[in-house]
Amino acid sequence: MTTTTPTIGLEAWEARRKAWTTPNNEYNAELVKEKAEKCRILLENQVERITFYRRLVLQHQSFRTPVPLQHVIPILVTGWQDDGLWPKGMIAPADSE
């Protein structure tokens, strides 16, 4: 007997939620910290943020590994400011609440 993942309804939602919230064994805590530190260092440089923006938005490239949204937002804001789409001097709110 084979089991299949439900495709509709509450069971499907619960199955998808379980998949999203189950830790991924490929990543360990040390690797995550190391990658976060590399992102932080790169994002301190405005030229790097503009370079990433151009690759992501204008050239439609993607990151090789997932990047947390908290790191992507400064890239977008910097690119929008450079393109004149975001007022210079304005900053993105720390949170949406």
Image (tube, helix red, strand yellow):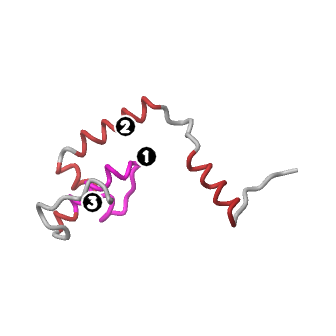
Q: Nearer the viewer, mark 1 or mark 3?
A: 3
Q: Which residue is mark 1?
A: 65
Three-letter amino acid code at the position of disc 3: Leu
State the image coordinates of residue 32 (x, y, percent, origin top left): 42, 36
Report if residue 9 lies within the magenta region: no
- Which quarter of the figure is the C terminus placed in? bottom left
Amino acid type, label 1: Thr
Q: Is residue 76 above or below residue 71?
A: below
Residue located 16% across and 69% down the image = 84
Label 2 near label 1: C-beta < 8 Å? Answer: yes
Give the CA separation, mark 1 to mark 3.
Answer: 18 Å
User: Where is residue 20 shown, x and y percent of the image?
Assistant: 56, 50
Question: Tag count in the figure?
Answer: 3
Residue found 22% across the figure and 65% down from its top: 80
- Picture quadrant of residue 87: bottom left
Kind of element beneath mark 2:
helix
Q: Which numbered tag is attached to residue 76?
A: 3
Badge 3 element: helix
Sooner in the amino-acid sequence: mark 1 or mark 2: 2
Q: How many other residues sit within 10 Å of disc 1, few (<14), some (14-19) or many (≥20)? A: few
* Real-space CA distance between mark 3 and mark 2, rounded to the nearest whole angstrom: 19 Å
Residue 77 figure quarter: bottom left
Look at the image and give the residue range highlighted in magenta. 54-79
Mark 2 belongs to which amino acid? Lys
Pointers 3 and 2 in contact (CB under 8 A)? no
Q: Horizontally, is 55 left or right of 30 in the view?
A: left
| Residue to which mark 2 is pinned | 35
First of labels 3, 2 by sequence position: 2
